[in-house]
Amino acid sequence: MNTTRYLSLILLLTVSSTAALAADTLYDKRFKQWLAKAQTGDSFSQYSLGNAYLRGNEVSINQSKAVHWFNQAAKQGHAKSQYKLGYLYYSGKGVKRSYRKAYKWFRLAANNDYSPAQFYIGKMYAEGQGTNVDNTKALNWYNKALDNDYSPAKHEIRRIEQRIKAARLQAQDKQAAEAATAAAEIPVKKIVVAKVIKPKPKPLQKNKKKSVKKKSGVAELLLQGNWTMDDEPTDILPSGLTECNVTANELYCKTNEMLITTKYADVNYKMESIAGRFNEKKKSFTLKNKKNTIFVLPADPDDPDVDPDNIPATGIETQVMKCKFEDKNKIRCYNDDFKKVYFTRK
């Protein structure tokens, strides 16, 4: 290595080390400022400390300290801290799960016009968590959240409106049945009904036999079911999660509305897939799937550090894979990025 390159490398390492040290010093200084202000009763600094301890930003994760500082700020009427306490008690993170306490803190934050808390109060009324089921109050709080631009409320408003409508129809049916029962108890005169002479049925014509194509052996092998991916039932091929039909040329599968929960969000979706272009000799086929993401509820809506790439957008996403049986219980596929995907069954 020549002298110039050596000196350049030393300079680069020095600059990098200095930058890293400056960043560490900056973070450490900010944390110390929060701590100093929090101890004097500054609610924003108390909230910031709670978030730092909750996420492990600039300090080791300590959920009990996070709860402590959120509690200090919440008692002063800090809406986001009230919401955070409600969320922690609702999910059981760092504390023992308590819907009663979650309701208390969500309600305080909701009354302070904080939209995520308004959404969760609606959710608790809808599900009877920490309070009695009340669809009217649930709808009211969901609408308040939506008015404050909290978009996940749209999905829940539709769901509760359908529930209220179904309950109304059920009540009407019950009233109609009771009225019919009461009417049946009133004696009525016997009514003579004229005899109806039915025409003689025409002799059935024999149908000509239709030629039926033989179903694909690949499709029949797929239809045997119990397919898994990463040791979990798959929502693409025949499994306990899907309903499937096979024809001579294609295998069509679909799911009901599904829910998957990650640390970032709750995601409701439906999946449809079509397996086709069967090659009996090579035991290969094409697998197209369409994922319709219906509803996404961020786990922590006021967390500014959540990577948006980890929270999917609503809408339809399609994918095409080329697949082949390695044996009757194992399928190897290549997705759009040419990455291998395996489906197996035991």
Image: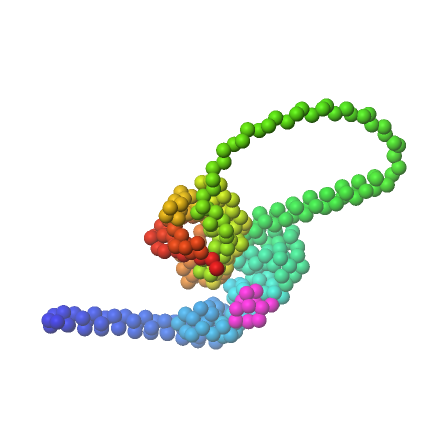
> Residue at 67% of width from left, 24% of height from top?
202
The location of residue 2, given as percent across then percent down, is 10, 71
> Residue at 65% of width from left, 51% of height from top?
136
Asked if residue 282 is positioned above or below residue 21 in the image, the reply reads above
Camera-side residue: 239 or 122? Answer: 239
Does residue 89 show up magenta in the picture? yes
Colour scheme of the picture? rainbow
Q: Confirm whether residue 37 shows in the render.
A: no
The location of residue 44, given as percent across then percent down, is 47, 67
Camera-side residue: 283 or 246? Answer: 283
* Residue 171 left/right relative to 83: right
> Residue at 66% of width from left, 25% of height from top?
203
Camera-side residue: 337 or 241? Answer: 241
Does residue 140 show up magenta in the picture? no
Asked if residue 250 is positioned above or below residue 117 in the image, the reply reads above
* Residue 98 left/right relative to 175: left
Q: Confirm whether residue 220 shows in the render.
A: yes
* Residue 277 left/right relative to 188: left
Split into 4 quadrants, where in the image is the N terminus?
bottom left
The location of residue 230, given as percent across then percent down, is 44, 60
Q: Which residues are magenta?
A: 88-98
The location of residue 85, given as percent across then percent down, is 54, 67
Magenta stretch: dominant SS?
loop
Q: Residue furthest left?
A: 2
